[in-house]
Image (cartoon, rainbow, N blue to C red):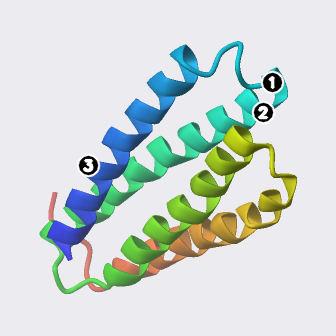
Amino acid sequence: MFRTAWVSGCISAGIGVAAGAFGAHALKGIVPPDLLVVYETGVRYQLLHAVALLAVGLAAAIKPEGRWALPTWLFIAGTALFSGSLYVLALTGIRWLGAVTPLGGLCFLAGWLAAAIGWRGPRPEV
């Protein structure tokens, strides 16, 4: 699970940086300010959860007997649903896509809970 979480986190971080740069440079003046804020929220959550994926990958490397598949896939799904719906909403103005965003938020919340539960067994020696 280390590889899946780590590679997904790296890819998501790269996409997040590219999306942030695109929003800061190409979308100013094209997208209304209220939708630009929506877009930036998608970028912020994508980057935050890219780091979360990297952390889950490291946790899987340190403690391979943990349960890391569920938080990995929930963070990936959360990013696709939450950030993805905000990107499309901001770029197209299709407001009903905002109804998809909370599903991504639920995936994020469940991913954090699953990550907390994933670390089971004795505490590692530090």
From the image, state whether disc 3 or disc 2 is nearer to you.
2
Tell me the quadrant of the picture where the N terminus can be found: bottom left
Q: Is residue 2 visible?
A: yes
The residue at the point 37 percent across, 72 percent down is 72
Image x and y of residue 21, in percent:
45, 23
CA–CA distance in space, label 1 to label 3:
30 Å
Mark 2: few/some/many CA within 10 Å (<14, 14-19, 20+): some
Reading the chain from its start, which is encountered first: label 3 or label 2? Answer: 3
- Residue 32's tag is 1
Q: Mark 2–mark 1 contact, CB under 8 Å? A: yes
The answer to whether 62 appears left or right of 47 in the picture is: left
Which element is circle 3 on? helix
Q: Is residue 124 visible?
A: no
CA–CA distance in space, label 3 to label 2:
27 Å
Mark 2 highlights which residue? Answer: 35
The answer to whether 29 appears left or right of 7 in the picture is: right
Image x and y of residue 41, in percent:
66, 38
- Residue 10's tag is 3
Query: Along the line of sight, which residue is nearer the eye, 67 or 45?
Result: 45
